[in-house]
Image (cartoon, rainbow, N blue to C red):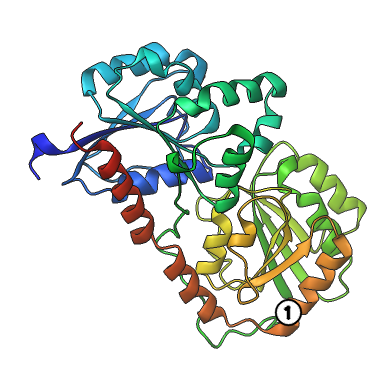
Amino acid sequence: MSNDNKIRILIITPTLQCGGSERYVSMLCNNINSSLFSVCLVVVNNSNAFYSISNPAVEIIDLHKKRVLFSLPAIKAVVKKFEPAIIFSTANHLNLYLAIFKKSFNPRIVFIAREASIVSINSRQAKMPSLYNRLIKKYYRRLDHIICQSGYMQQDLLNHYHIALAKTSVISNAVPAGLDPLPPQHEQGSDGVYKFITVARLSEEKGIERLVHATGLLLLPFKYYIIGDGHKRDQLQKLIDELQLGEKVFLIGEKADPFKGMEDADLYLCGSYYEGFPNVLLEAGACGIPVIAFNVPGGISEIITDKNGILVDDNDIIAFAAAIKTALAAGFNRQAITENTKDRFSVKKMMAATENLFMTLGENK
């Protein structure tokens, strides 16, 4: 396909800071087929970038805007210059913003949105939840297509917002490259102390406090490392101190490569109250680490099976602690977890599905 026949895609993201949606954008840009697609990445504010784009074929434009709300004139200017066939947005509030103003763009442009969470639950976090939800119900159907990370997310859009099934696709996240399991000879608790890990933003929805409570019920020797940062850090540290877990539970802070040095973790603990399709569970699986998680709304149950972890009834802290002991005794096959995860959630599969969608919707544009 000649350069003139490439499908022109304008990808828009609020930031490239540390987060699952931002990681997806970087993975998409770094792996897209440059012989088929001409790509321009627009970042509303790229001042604190965590992820980098290594693909030289992708043009990157920083709008230097503090908020998505103020970005429309700048986005329109880029659209006028780049003349995309597809505008692809990657965050719920940005998706809604573009849906509201879609009719002010060239009608030939195809608008594709990707959802990073469960829309009906995520909308409750808005400053005015009722208004925000009404806006989604009114304007989201303007979008030409919506990519969902999980079947649960897709059904949420169908049931709560009456989006047509044909206008949605389920394309799961992918395992990033460079995550490797431990050698097969590794044994759980081989040094006499079990090692647990959680990688998450320290915010309410991640449920870190119930993981601290659950580990506090354990009588076995362990070290629990919580990697991430957020506004609940001080509260969590206070809880750790109150439960006298200061020598067992550690708030590590944010790390560029959170699983580096943690590949020997015996279990990954997930405390979330809901999740769209958590990237960290794929990363844990790629390292061969079994997962203990609450069975909550979202895509967790589409990742965890009896071969790679245990699901616990939501908010049953005692059952969660018991599941930790059960998992340690079960002796999961870490190599099988790695192989299965990398097969189910490969970058190749994610890119093939995404590029096929772009080709189908963007042809003849």
The residue located at (85%, 67%) in the rendering is 319
Question: How many numbered discs?
Answer: 1
Give percent across and percent down for residue 133.
65, 25
The quadrant where residue 61 appears = top left
Q: Along the line of sight, which residue is nearer the eye, 252 or 83?
A: 83
Looking at the image, residue 85 lies above or below residue 106:
below
The spot of residue 340 in percent (x, y) is 48, 74
Identify the secondary structure beneath mark 1: helix
User: Image check: 168 left or right of 331?
Assistant: left
Q: Quadrant of residue 57?
A: top left
Mark 1 lies on residue: 328
Of the 4 image quadrants, the one containing the N terminus is top left
Quarter holding residue 113: top left
Residue 51 visible in the picture: no
- Residue plotted at (51% across, 80% down): 335
Residue 327 vertical position relative to residue 283 in the rendered view, above or below: below
Residue 290 is left or right of residue 217, and the answer is left
Mark 1 residue type = Leu
Point out residue 159 in the picture as x, y percentages from the top left corner: 62, 40
Residue 1 visible in the shown view? yes
Tell me if mark 1 has few (under 14), some (14-19) or many (20+) residues whose alpha carbon lies within 10 angstroms of its own: some
Residue 192 against residue 58 in the figure, above or below: below
**Residue 90 x %, y %:** 46, 36
Q: Quick one: quadrant of the C terminus?
A: top left
Which residue is pictured at 69% across the width and 30% down the height? 125
